[in-house]
Image (spheres, rainbow, N blue to C red):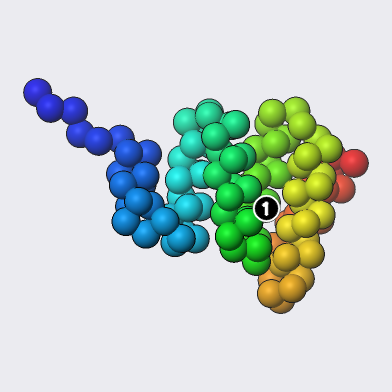
Amino acid sequence: MTQSPSRLDQLEKMLKQDPHDAFIQYAVAMEYARLGQSTQAVERFKLLIREHPDYAAAYFMCGRTLEKMDQRTGACEMYRSGIAAARRVGDDHAAGEMLAALEAIT
């Protein structure tokens, strides 16, 4: 019996085909987070943010992951940066979510 590739394997394969695709980068980071591999998730979120600084969801989910790792200072920094990014692109909803998350941990 052959084992089918995992979702992470499939996403990584897609990312190799298009390494700068923001959505695939986000999906890979989210899959690491879902699998409980928080360090890898944070690394992937940060890579996505470096390449696509206006991808507001990456800041939010990176902050959430850092919170789960009990890294409140890092989470706060991520939320603050994310609020600025969301405001840059006019995403008031994302900015509001990150502001609420920031207020909840400060």
Q: Dividing the image into 4 quarters, which one contains the N terminus?
A: top left
Note whether 75 is above or below 79 in the view shown: above
Location of residue 72 in the rendering, given as x and y in whole percent from the top left corner = 81, 35
Q: Position of residue 3 (x, y in %)?
A: 18, 28
Q: Residue at x 72, y 67 (%)?
A: 86
**Which residue ends up furthest to the right in the rendered image?**
106
Q: Is residue 71 left or right of residue 12?
A: right
| Residue corresponding to mark 1 | 59
Amino acid at pointer 1: Tyr
Image spot of residue 42 (x, y percent): 61, 40
Residue at left 44%, top 61%?
21
**The C terminus, quarter of image:** top right
Residue beneath the point at 73% across and 65% down? 85
How far from the left and from the top, in percent, is residue 35? 47, 31
Q: Secondary structure at mark 1?
A: helix
Residue 57 appears anywhere in the view: no
